Image (cartoon, coloured by chain):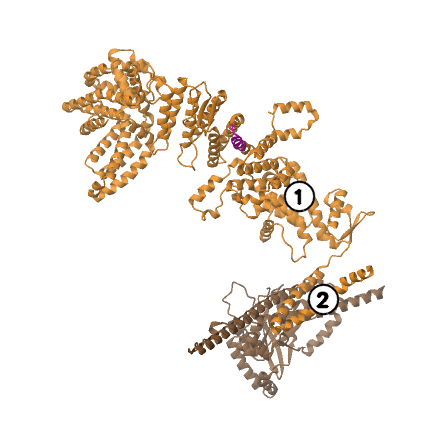
Amino acid sequence: MSRFFTTGSDSESESSLSGEELVTKPVGGNYGKQPLLLSEDEEDTKRVVRSAKDKRFEELTNLIRTIRNAMKIRDVTKCLEEFELLGKAYGKAKSIVDKEGVPRFYIRILADLEDYLNELWEDKEGKKKMNKNNAKALSTLRQKIRKYNRDFESHITNYKQNPEQSADEDAEKNEEDSEASSDEDEDEDGVSAATFLKKKSEAPSGDSRKFLKKMEDEDEDSEDSEDDEDWDTGSTSSDSDSEEEEGKQTVLASRFLKKAPTTEEDKKAAEKKREDKAKKKHDRKSKRLDEEEEDNEGGEWERVRGGVPLVKEKPKMFAKGTEITHAVVIKKLNEILQARGKKGTDRAAQIELLQLLVQIASENNLGEGVIVKIKFNIIASLYDYNPNLATYMKPEMWQKCLDCINELMDILFANPNIFVGENILEESENLHNVDQPLRVRGCILTLVERMDEEFTKIMQNTDPHSQEYVEHLKDEAQVCAIIERVQRYLEEKGTTEEICRVYLRRILHTYYKFDYKAHQRQLTPPEGSSKSEQDQAENEGEDSAVLMERLCKYIYAKDRTDRIRTCAILCHIYHHALHSRWYQARDLMLMSHLQDNIQHADPPVQILYNRTMVQLGICAFRQGLTKDAHNALLDIQSSGRAKELLGQGLLLRSLQERNQEQEKVERRRQVPFHLHINLELLECVYLVSAMLLEIPYMAAHESDARRRMISKQFHHQLRVGERQPLLGPPESMREHVVAASKAMKMGDWKTCHSFIINEKMNGKVWDLFPEADKVRTMLVRKIQEESLRTYLFTYSSVYDSISMETLSDMFELDLPTVHSIISKMIINEELMASLDQPTQTVVMHRTEPTAQQNLALQLAEKLGSLVENNERVFDHKQGTYGGYFRDQKDGYRKNEGYMRRGGYRQQQSQTAY
Amino acid sequence: THRPHAQMIPSAEAMASRKEGTGSAATSSSSTTGPAGKGKGKGGSGDSAVKQVQIDGLVVLKIIKHYQEEGQGTEVVQGVLLGLVVEDRLEITNCFPFPQHTEDDADFDEVQYQMEMMRSLRHVNIDHLHVGWYQSTYYGSFVTRALLDSQFSYQHAIEESVVLIYDPIKTAQGSLSLKAYRLTPKLMEVCKEKDFSPEALKKGNITFEHMFEEVPIVIKNSHLINVLMWELEKKSAVADKHELLSLASSNHLGKNLQLLMDRVDEMSQDIVKYNTYMRNTSKQQQQKHQYQQRRQQENMQRQSRGEPPLPEEDLSKLFKPPQPPARMDSLLIAGQINTYCQNIKEFTAQNLGKLFMAQALQEYNN
């Protein structure tokens, strides 16, 4: 191959010499001299196309030539300049390139330049000798080309893999150029023609040599396959190559076979452009072609007719005729896999190769074992495609991956005799012995888990408000289906551990979804039982609740890793809570004792825990259990970091505190958007429950100096509301709640109600509940009750007695409810009153101290402490004497106590004696 | 907490003018002010220079008007009293208000203002001698540091000056509340020293009862005005005269209690502070004692071994005594508490009387 390079560069130098002339000379000048002519008009049209393309390409080639010259004289500065120009020129030629594919010569110069620069870079000695400008240019250029080449990575690797073709092509290219210029310079042309010939004659042998290396068992068909392969690579790797060859063929065809071109009619239009170039070449080449004809002896003919469509997508793999056996395929597989993870490997190409291999294997009926094995590897390399954990799969890759896994599952289901497992050693694999069960190393579960993670990653990285997200979300069904299949598969074959894992996956995809069907079924009670049963049969069997129950119970029973169980419990609770099964959810939460040790869990589990707690709180709220709701939400809400704690976004505040790494980690923890819990809903639920608790409490302890607040957050909101200099009608959810609280404080439940439940709040919050109307009714009732309590607390001092009927009218509650509420208040000693049954009135006792009395009591208390403090000062002054007073006082007190209580008892005991 | 007192400062120039004024006053009525001069001379010995304050009706009205127009709630109004000293009697014949302080006009020159006012008043032949200042109060909470400092600087510059405290709330209830206070000579001494440590106060023998002395007030009107008053009294309706019989007064008591409680809290804190100080001092004393003992023992040993004794060290450097807390604040608080208590006592006594009266009336009616 090195020889190709040398020849290549030879011809190159020549062509670069002739290149200068080429610029000045009109391109179409030598048309007239062509002995072989096609019809005139056809040529005309073609000429137009040609000039557009060639103009750009000429520009490029000129620049490339200068670069090569500069490379030769080690003028890196020049190289840099030219390279920049080249980049610009390429940009201009972009439209053509898009149509034609990247020209080989362009890739070639990029690759060569990079190699050359690396060489220079390595050469420490030479670098030292270099002058300053050059050294500087060298480093800049090196960086630039590295960056630039990244866009052409696949092309360059392609080129590097089979440089001889491109060299070949390049040589021909040069040849062309030189031919074009040869009108004026016959000698030179002769030389280049000679070089070309030399090269061309060697090319096939080179090919075959390379091929020989690859294939051990080359049989008599080798010639065929060689041609085949030659052709294939050409067509896939570079269009220009095939065009070139086709061009040749057309030439041949036009000479020998009139009908030949028709076979190629369906080829790209671009080829036509090449055709006339080839024709132009033709008279110069005729001699050479004769030789070539002899060389190839019909090989090229067969190519044209034969496997064009079939082999087109296949890069070199096996010789066509090679007997494809297990050994061969496995060997090839290992060969491909060896490159995996290495630096220069083109991961995309690898995947392609593997896919081809599968195709070959299936075509040759190598058995499912091999296919399964290769499929495993395809999926693995799909996952490998992104070198970075943070980046997510491209959609097409993702699709491929899903398909692949589906296919794999198909195979596994179809062939129950295949055993898959990660514990099967490479050596003990059985891929083809059909008599025994097939054994393949690989873990389907791991693949699926990884797939699930990839899915999460995709969702995390998609803008949740875009159509794209919806598109991606559609894949969720597919993911679920796959997980379900794996679950079915593993239920038959897997270990309990694996089953637990796959169950957890299933659970994770189920727990957050509200089961509308089951809900519907619940709503339509079994009045028309036969009909609903029918419906049930239609609505594919299992309620998600039943499913969750089954999966979770299995995990509770069988799982040995704590984490899976914890997750399962949390999901189970979440699911219960989501479906308003409050008592089950609460009991499970309490029984699991998760609250005690959740702080030792890893962050994702903690996030899940937080989510569960929040869901639990919201569930309690829906059931009208405000206190429970408040308690459940308190932890999350009081920190003011609900967003962060639920994994629904990063806080800006702490953005400065963490570094990039931490941020990345945190980003990976985020919950995808479709799992989010609405934060406004959460806050609203919390605030409303706080309001229902706090307002009556505040009213009850109005004059208490040492009252505690139940909810700091709520008080904060109230204070914010108070601080407003001008109070407009409420806009936000919080303002609504604050306004409602104020109304409630006055016992004005109607205003409170209208603030809590109205159009705005419905849209923002209440409609988000599955049973919105039920929740609203519950809320109204709660508001009425708590307003009544507040009213009684606040205004009881004004009344001597109040009729319960009046109260029931005021708060639109029925009499028994009012009765029960007041009774409860009396029992709890919140309200000093008694019920007068015959008149249905509440009679206030007025045992509560008045404001003045309260103040006086407080003052007395304070004075007490003041005196105590003062006495301590006295202690200091008096030193030892201080004790005397104390003792005496204590003694007095004791005495008093004795008189009061002990004495009585003593008397009693005396009488008993 | 709610008294944005501006400190009243008699300006140097005011003092100068005052000095000059007293000079002129002395010359003008030299024959009559003999005892006053004597009183002045005796000021240091314990007796106050002023035995009585005589206020013109005009001054009272002006003060009331000032508050009504400018003061509200906890806001306090202040002004300057003008008059002259006649024997041991301070006659206040005129006054002018001080503009309210706001954040905006921080560069307002009070001294300049006072001077201008007095000069202008002199031009229209009004008494222009600076004899003190007045201040309104909110539920009698005037015993503060600011008032102390102001009055001290007044009394320091103009010995006879008094501060008039006007309580608008009590006045609104039907009885004019206007009181004249002076710092006792003892307190003056202490303030001059600027040493408020416990020892200094002890030495000065100051208690909260002996901080301020109240000077009796006489309101004097011209005969013509007296005649007019009699006329008016005849004409006014009965209801107007008996505001002080109003029974609704719980709010007043509540407020007083609240304020009293706040003060008690402050007092408590102050005592705790003092306690800590005491404990620290005694602890240090102990340490010091121990250290000395150890020193002594060591020296004894050294002596027995024939070595020279250790050099004497400055103990005060080793044991820095803790900073004694200023006791003036607690004195003031105690004074304030005393005022509140008196207020409450007075108030409740009055109210009880009123209630008994009401009861008796009711019984009589029934």
Q: Is residue A195 left or right of residue A49?
A: left
Kind of residue at disc 2: Arg
Q: Is residue A40 visible?
A: no
Q: Residue at x 51, y 63 (%)?
A: B104
- Residue linked to disc 2: A893
User: What numbered label is drawn on residue A873?
Assistant: none
- Provide the residue span drawn in magenta: A494-504
Task: Write down the chain letter for disc 2.
Answer: A
| Residue A874 in the image, given as x and y percentages of width and height | 62, 72
The residue marked by circle 1 belongs to what chain?
Answer: A
Majority secondary structure in the magenta region:
helix
**Residue closer to the observer: A772 or B307:** B307
Q: In the image, residue A65 lies at what x, y percent? A: 22, 31
Q: Is residue B319 above or below residue B84?
A: above
Q: Quadrant of residue A78?
A: top left
- Please name the residue that numbered disc 1 is placed on: A753
Q: Secondary structure beneath disc 2?
A: helix
Report which quarter residue B118 is drawn in. bottom right
Q: Which chain is brown?
A: B
Q: Position of residue A698 (x, y in %)?
A: 66, 52
Furthest residue to the left? A187
Spot the orange chain and give its letter. Answer: A
Residue farthest to the front, as pictured: B305
Rendered view: B88 above or below A37:
below
Which residue appears at 70% of the width and 44% of the height?
Answer: A784
* Front of the two marks 1 and 2: 2
Looking at the image, tell me whether mark 1 or mark 2 is earlier in sequence order: 1
Q: Amino acid at mark 1?
A: His
Q: Check the picture and name the quadrant holding the C terminus of chain A.
A: bottom right
